[in-house]
Image (cartoon, coloured by chain):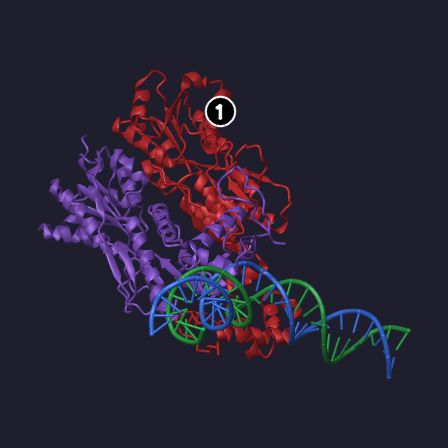
Chain colours: A purple, B red, C green, D blue
Amino acid sequence: MNVRNQPQPAAFTPLGTIRGGVTIEDVAHQARVSRQTVSNVINAPHRVKPETNLRVKAVIDTLGYRVNRSARNLRTQQSRVIGYCLPPINAAGNSVLDAFLHALVEAAKDRGYHLLLVTAQDKTSEMNSYWELAAQSAVDGIVFAQTDYDDPRPPALLDAKVPFVSFGRTWGKVEHSWVDVDGAAGTRMATEHLLQLGHRSFAFIGHSTRSVGNVERERGVIDSLVAAGIDPEENLSLIDVDGDTSVADQLALVLDGTHAPSAIVTVNDVHAVTALAELERRGLTPGHDVGVVGFDDSPVASVAGGGLTSVRQPLGRVATELIGALASQFDRPAGQPRGVLLSPELIVRRTTIGAP
Amino acid sequence: MNVRNQPQPAAFTPLGTIRGGVTIEDVAHQARVSRQTVSNVINAPHRVKPETNLRVKAVIDTLGYRVNRSARNLRTQQSRVIGYCLPPINAAGNSVLDAFLHALVEAAKDRGYHLLLVTAQDKTSEMNSYWELAAQSAVDGIVFAQTDYDDPRPPALLDAKVPFVSFGRTWGKVEHSWVDVDGAAGTRMATEHLLQLGHRSFAFIGHSTRSVGNVERERGVIDSLVAAGIDPEENLSLIDVDGDTSVADQLALVLDGTHAPSAIVTVNDVHAVTALAELERRGLTPGHDVGVVGFDDSPVASVAGGGLTSVRQPLGRVATELIGALASQFDRPAGQPRGVLLSPELIVRRTTIGAP
DNA sequence: AACGTTCATATGAACGTTCAAACGGAGACC
DNA sequence: GGTCTCCGTTTGAACGTTCATATGAACGTT
């Protein structure tokens, strides 16, 4: 009685009315085989005689049958869903979110997984969300980002036996799988590019928080300067975006001081735009008078200041590696954790090499 | 044998090891009641004697029991998950995505739903994804955005009986629930603000595509000019971001022509940043010489050009209405479709009122 | 001809939950 | 004391799959 063998609507390919679902039993009956054979056609076609295979597939098409996820998940004890917590919205936004999310969803799809979103106020409630999802068998594993030094999430998730990978290292006490982009290498590339252009006095606009990403990016600048024989104490001004004073004001102060920077490296594109605005207010031309480099190569980067030089992260690769690492944990839960460090790329534009 | 009554780890509140799940039967046994009573404690506590309630809850806490979603979904024939397709990444990015997604996830959570992501190349594959998700009972309904005139999605989903709401009107032949922000009102506010400041010649930077959002935003500008007795034919230059010529070049051409605009309204913040760059290249000061207004009030808006005047959409409200509309379809599938039009807000900053 | 092997398909059980109905006891009413 | 009602609880069945195992036919070997 469950059979709803209705004609295909013209609109678009598979279709057929959804609710009142067609079951595997309906297909089996119509194809004159058993449930299990239909199941085999879907999950292990090599076990089925080619002829039967074709016949069952035809019926599946006609009825527009699709496996019921809940039933399958219940039986197989997995959900084929991966959980991800959206990083909190901060003033500077999250310029990689859009591209990263796309890449993550795509990478998950390629391996037969879907992405389920949650949000959280803080890391504790984030961990609780993860635990809830896993305890309810709503997800098979977790991807999280924005790691801190000694991040509390890895030990907690390890303890709860929830499979996970992080986008970002944590340098914590426990071993776990991670994928990261070498932020220090990114800002090294930026700094060396600026050094080559003749700049000798720098500013770095970044966070005072100890998140791994921030610290690494700052370190990259310092390392390059030291390697070039330039004293960071004297020729690198650090500007804190989380401070009480606005970035524009801090920048103004620095530009008016001794050792006024002629090159500015930033922790992300939004802060680079802030810098551009301040420079222009002073009649300084980015790329000519002062070199500016952003980070993330977000959509604004291609237009800000006529083209903002920026560090691009290989987000597609990051996503693939993340999902791959998770999937390998599903396959052998006792496997060795693995870290993958990827290199970013410097996209050179007008704000470092522009004519006046 | 399934019982894993292990001590609570210190790390964070609920916890306990995940895999090898505790079932409702384990709880029932330990609390000396039947399955169904445990189920009632969770889903209909009023049916249970207060004393029993407490006892069962204590056991649930001790064992760290959580309902298995797959089993519940299978039995109740719903997933409590909503599907959403990430809009394709275009050159200008999607400046509202971050904030909107957050709002959507939050709104869904408030009603006991989760958000599941998919991506798609085009509208056809998008519709297929939706159909697959619904046919598999992986989602109860769909939210989609970026509507076109005569969008193919509403008729197709209606046909397939997949519950859905759109963020954006479609002006199509079929009736369906939607939530939208009045884009025309947004650019009217922007234009009137600029008119009040004395501007008489305008440019609008937008798409040539016929998506509802674009057209409405352009219409708002035209309507305001007409109402103020200004002829758009003469005093409004339209710049097409999808054209062969770059936006900067088109803008340059317009600024050099007769009726050079002193005010620029854009379809989103990224294009406003493009305009800012071109103005500054010409030594024109935004806010003093030329007024610039963006759209979306994305994170760059607060810093670009020292503060970009922009139109902010009430995304939290949009999300709540979207989820509410979907939920009401679940409750009574035969209910009347309903449209909700919300008003945006103009955030005035330096690029329209700034001192030189 | 009897037996073992392989291939294709079918059957029973189980995954963990909620629904529908049944049960038993306490109290109210006649 | 018997019957009715209500409350709290239990029991059997069902949701739609896949796993483990059984069945039976076809074929090759001795």
Chain letter of disc 1 in the image: B
- Residue C1 image offset from top left, x and y in percent: 45, 73
Q: Quadrant of residue B13?
A: bottom left
Q: For numbered disc 1, what is the local secondary structure?
A: helix
- Residue B237 image offset from top left, x and y in percent: 39, 21
Q: Which residue is mark 1?
A: B224
Question: Is B217 drawn above or below residue A317 in the view shown?
Answer: above
Q: In which quadrant of the rendered image does the N terminus of chain A lie?
A: bottom right
Question: Is A6 drawn above or below residue B22 in the view shown?
Answer: above
Total numbered circles: 1
Foreground residue, A256 or B289? B289
Q: Is residue A152 visible?
A: no
- Residue A267 image offset from top left, x and y in percent: 26, 48
Q: Quadrant of residue B172?
A: top right
Q: In which quadrant of the rendered image does the C terminus of chain A lie?
A: top left
In this view, the residue farthest toward the left is A229
Q: Residue at x 61, y 77 (%)?
A: B33
Q: Residue at x 34, y 26 (%)?
A: B243
What amino acid type should be assigned to the residue bearing mark 1?
A: Ser
- Residue A145 is left or right of residue A309, and the answer is right
Q: Residue at x 53, y 56 (%)?
A: A24
Q: Rate crowding at label 1 as few (under 14), some (14 to 19) or many (20 or more) other CA atoms within 10 Å.
A: many
Question: Is B50 drawn above or below residue B352 in the view shown?
Answer: below
- Residue C30 is left or right of residue B113, and the answer is right
Q: Quadrant of residue B280?
A: top left
Foreground residue, B132 or A312? B132
Foreground residue, A186 or A101? A101
- Residue A348 image offset from top left, x and y in percent: 20, 39
Foreground residue, A180 or B156? B156
Q: Is residue A97 visible?
A: yes
